[in-house]
Image (spheres, rainbow, N blue to C red):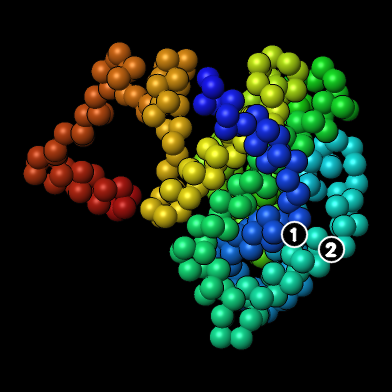
């Protein structure tokens, strides 16, 4: 205990939670977001054919969570675009990633060691957005726990939730990629983080917000860096989710083990006709034609 007090972990968490995000962390967030946009099939062709559409898609990748949260809370979806410094900074990053000569900027930020640092910085911003979303909803709907969770969830993963709309801007329609149907790790983590911050905001979780921000940021950054380094698209929650779903929802593991009835036998095939029957049928058809 004396060691923990000597480390001043509480003061460290408090300082970390008050650290400003602009411009270093925000730039990292914009770079990684637009980098993922460039990975999308056809996005480079769209940037050559229609730079305006490419820019709009990039802005959705950077600010989609703010737009969706403002719509949910009754605000104007264009409110965030009044922050000129953020819009200009994101636009500059978009231009460098898509139009820098010889693709130099893209090659630099896509270099794995650099990318790992940027991914970690992005998760710092994601955690702050989740906490801010829950706090904002708490002020507007003091007892609306579900609203707090949804708002924090949208703030953390709004870009993924708007992916189908962004695809329509690029002329692509892939309903099977709906993020709610097929949640990625950041989307699931944003939902779980929103629940934790809602419990903290309503004083049901005996942890300070600064400590929770610090702990959740470490978890998100560590997980994303590890997954990016291994080029993995799995989820650290997969094992726990599979067991919980099995206990609560029965056959969520894909289980045919819950089918207690044997499958119905296939319908019997029609009997093979003999040569006599075939010749008799041919004779009858000929007689009908003669009539």
Q: How many marks?
A: 2
Q: What element carries label 2?
A: helix
Q: From this viewpoint, is residue 61 visible?
A: no
In depth, the one of 42 and 205 nearer the eye is 205
Q: Is 134 left, or right, of 211 in this rendering?
A: right
| Mark 1 vs 2: CB contact within 8 A | yes
**Front tag of 1 and 2:** 1
Please determine whether, in this image, residue 89 is positioned above or below residue 205: below
Give the percent coordinates (x, y) of residue 269.
21, 34
In-front residue for pair 91/264: 91
Q: What's the mark number on residue 140? A: none
Please provide percent x and percent y for residue 5: 59, 25
Q: What residue did someone put label 1 on? A: 23
Q: Which of marks 1 and 2 is nearer the N terminus?
A: 1
Identify the residue position indicated by label 2 in the image.
85
User: Crowding at label 2, few (<14), some or many (≥20) Cα neighbours within 10 Å?
Assistant: few
SS category of the residue bearing label 1:
loop
**Residue occupying image coordinates x 45% and y 27%:** 241
User: Residue placed at 73% from the left, 51% from the top?
Assistant: 21
The residue drawn where x is 74% and y is 72% is: 92
Name the residue at 30% across, 20% down.
257
**Coordinates of residue 71 in the picture (x, y in percent):** 84, 42
Residue 32, percent across and down? 60, 60
Up the image or down, 17 lies above or below 116; here it is above
Density class for disc 1 (Cα within 10 Å; few <14, some 14-19, many ≥20) is: few
């Amino acid at each position: 205990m004396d060691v923990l007090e000597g480390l001043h972990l509480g003061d460290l968490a408090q300082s970390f939670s008050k650290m400003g995000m602009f411009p270093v962390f925000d730039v990292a967030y914009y770079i990684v977001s637009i980098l993922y946009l460039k990975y999308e099939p056809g996005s480079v062709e769209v940037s050559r054919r229609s730079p305006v559409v490419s820019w709009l898609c990039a802005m959705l990748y950077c600010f989609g969570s703010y737009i969706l949260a403002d719509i949910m809370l009754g605000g104007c979806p264009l409110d965030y675009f009044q922050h000129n410094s953020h819009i200009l900074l994101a636009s500059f990053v978009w231009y460098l990633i898509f139009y820098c000569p010889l693709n130099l900027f893209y090659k630099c930020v896509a270099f794995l060691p650099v990318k790992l640092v940027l991914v970690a910085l992005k998760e710092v911003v994601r955690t702050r957005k989740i906490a801010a979303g829950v706090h904002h909803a708490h002020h507007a709907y003091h007892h609306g726990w579900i609203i707090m969770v949804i708002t924090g969830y949208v703030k953390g993963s709004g870009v993924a939730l708007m992916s189908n709309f962004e695809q329509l801007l690029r002329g692509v329609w892939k309903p099977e990629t709906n993020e709610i149907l097929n949640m990625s790790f950041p989307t699931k983590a944003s939902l779980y983080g929103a629940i934790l911050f809602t419990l903290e905001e309503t004083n049901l979780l005996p942890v300070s917000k600064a400590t929770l921000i610090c702990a959740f940021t470490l978890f998100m950054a560590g997980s994303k860096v590890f997954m990016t380094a291994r080029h993995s698209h799995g989820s650290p929650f997969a094992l726990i989710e599979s067991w919980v779903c099995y206990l609560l929802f029965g056959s969520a593991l894909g289980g045919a083990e819950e089918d207690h009835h044997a499958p119905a036998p296939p319908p019997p095939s029609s009997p093979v006709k003999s040569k006599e029957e075939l010749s008799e049928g041919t004779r009858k058809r000929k007689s009908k034609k003669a009539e």
